[in-house]
Amino acid sequence: MTARYKDETVARVRDASDIVQVVSEYVQLKKVGNRFVGLCPFHSERTPSFSVSKDRQLFYCFGCHAGGNVFSFVMRIEGLTFPEAVERLAARAGLDISSDLETEEDRAARERRQRAFEANQLAMAYYCHVLNRSTSAQARAARDYLLGRGIDRAVAERFNIGLTPAGWDGLVKALSAKGISRETLVECGLALVDDGSGRIFDRFRNRVMFPIINVWGRVIGFGGRSYDGTNPKYLNSPESLVFSKRRNLYGLNLAADSIKSSGRAILVEGYIDVVSLMKAGVPNVVATLGTALTVEQARLIARYASELVLFYDGDDAGFAATAKAVEVAQSVGLAVRVAPLPGGHDPDSFARQEGPEAVKALLDDAEPFASYRIRRILQGTDLSSIESRVKAADQVAETLASVSDDVERAEYLREVCEKLGVDPQVLSAAVRRLVAAARDRQRVPSVRLKREAFRPVDSSPLASKAYFEVERWLLLLALTDAEAAARIADAVGENPLSTSPNAKLMDIVLQARSEGKHIDAASLVDAAGPELAGYVSELVGSEDAFDLDEGAVDRALDLLRRRRMQVRLAEIDAEIKQAESAGAVERIKALLKEQVELRQALGRDIALY
C-alpha cells in the first residue's frame, strides 16, 4: 500500500499530521479522559460513539467499526487513495514530498540501517565493558569522575554508560573481530578515516559514553563527555542513517511509560541531568541532544504527553532557551510550564545538592510560561522610566497574545496594568490585535465525498475464542515493547500464529522490529492495509482489557503453549477415529502416547473451548 512512497516519506507526513487536529477539521470533538469523542462522520448517530486517541494516533467508531490512522481517516472521508491521502496531508503540513518508488538504493539503505543498529549495539557493550572491567588508570579515573557526579556502577549499568579507551583503534579492532565492516563503522559514525593512510580509527577516545537509545530499544548513537578537561566537552555521533539529533531525545526509552501515564514530560538539556533526576525519583524526564528543542522533538513528546515542563538553568541563557522552547512546544499543541532553577544551578547540581524533595517541590510549583515571563519582565522594568514601562508593556502584550484562556489573560492584564500604570483598554486592544494577526491563516477546506462501505475483519472459525484472544494479547505486547517482541519472535518463530488477522499483523510487527524500523499502532495500520485498519484500532483501544505489566510476556506465552496443546488434543481425537477406521494399530498407539504426554504437560484434562 505504501509502494509509491518511501517508508521514511510516509512516516514524515504522519509525524506532521496530528490526528486530533486533522479530524477536528471535519468533526466537532470533545475531550473525555485521555480521548476525544464526537459524532461519527461515517454513519448517522445521535450519541457520540466516535473516538480519537492522541497518544496512539488512531480513530475508532464503536457504532460502525470504522477505524484506522490519520491516512485511513482522510481516505474514507475524502474518498481518496492512499497516495492521494499522503499528498493531501503533506500539502496540509507544508511538506514537499517525492512520489518515487522505492529503488534498489532505498532497499540497500534499509539493509545498511540494520547493520548500523548492530554495530551501535556492539559498541555500547564494548564501552560498558571498558568502564566496568578495565583496570587501566583511565578507567579508574572515569569511574571516580562518575562517582563524583553521583553515578555509581548500578546507575551506570541502568543507563548503559560506558567508556572509550584512550587508544586510537580499540573499538575498531573489537568490532572488526565481530564481523562489522569498516564501511559500517564509518557510516554510523563510530570511526573516522585517515585521509593520508586510508586507515580507520575510533571517533570517540577517552570519553564517558552515553548511548542514545530510541523508544524501541535500538541504540542509534552516542554522546561522549570529557571527564578530564579535554576539549570539546561534548562530542556527539554525527547524523547517520539511524541517527538524527533533531528527531530523538535522550532517555525516552526509559521515560516513555511514565510520561504517558502522567501526561507530563520534564525537559532538560543534558544527559547527566536526566540521570540525576531519574535517580532523584523523576521518571518522566528527557533531554535534547545538544540542540535547542526542535519541532520534531516536540511532536515526539506530544505523542506521549499533553504538558511539557521546562527545567532549564535559571540564568539569562536558560531563559532565552526556555522562550525558544516554549514557542516550539506550543506550536504542536503542548501546554507548557516552567520550573526555573535558582541561580548557579543546573538540574544535576540541584538534584545532588538539594535532594529529591527539593526537586519534587520545584517541579510541582512549575508555572505557566506566561506567568514566568511576565514576572521576569516586571522584575527587569524600571518603573520610574516611561520608556522602560512602554517596552515592558509591549513585551507583555506579545506574551498575553499566546494565552488562549480569556479568564487567565484578563487576570494577567489586571495585574500588569496596575503595576505598569497602563490603561487596561489600551493594552487589551494591543493584545487583541496580536491575537487576530496570529489567527489570520487560511484553513484547508473540508469536502466530504462518498463514504466507503465498512468491511468486517476476517476471523478464523478453526480456532477457539480463547486462542484468538491469547494471540491478540501477544500482538499487543509485541507492538508496545521491543524486548517483548524479541522474546515472542523466538517463541513463535517455528510455529507462527494461526488465526487471522493476528498472524498477518504479528508478521508485520516482528519483521519491522527485526529491521530496526519504527512500528506503532498508526504505522501498523499503513502496513496492514485498509481492510485491517478498524481491527488494529479496536485492538489498541481495548488494551486496558489485557495484562501488559511486568511478567505479562511469560504468562501470555505460557497460555499460548497451553492453548496449542489443547488444540493438538482436539486434533488427536479426530486422528484416532480415522486411525481406528483404517485399522492402523501402531498409529493409534503413537497418538494415545502423545495424548497422555500432552495431558500430563497440561496437568489435568482440559477440554478445548
Image: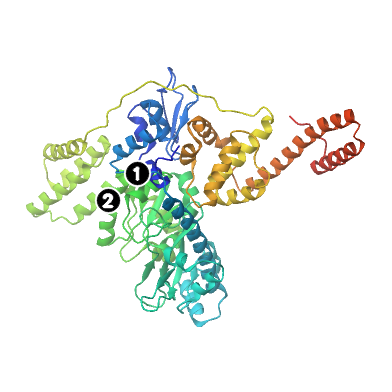
What residue appears at the point 17 percent right and 38 percent down from the top-left corner? 437
Q: Quadrant of the N terminus?
A: top left
Q: Name the residue nearer the viewer: 42 or 49.
A: 42
Q: Residue at x 32, y 39 (%)?
A: 90
- Marks 2 and 1, the one that precedes in the sequence: 1
Locate the C terminus by quadrant. Answer: top right
Q: Which residue is mark 2?
A: 372
Residue 598 visible, this angle: yes
Percent x, y of residue 57? 43, 38
| Residue at 25% in and 57% down | 320
Using residue 335 as the reference point, say whether residue 382 is left or right of it.
left
Which residue is most to the left? 386
Task: Determine whether 556 is above or below 195 in the image.
Answer: above
Closest to the camera, between mark 2 and mark 1, is 1
Outermost residue, front side: 104
Instruction: Identify residue for label 1.
Output: 334
Residue 470: image x %, image y %?
Answer: 65, 37
- The amino acid pointed to by label 2 is Tyr
Using the rendered image of the protein, determine whether residue 152 is visible from the camera's viewpoint: no
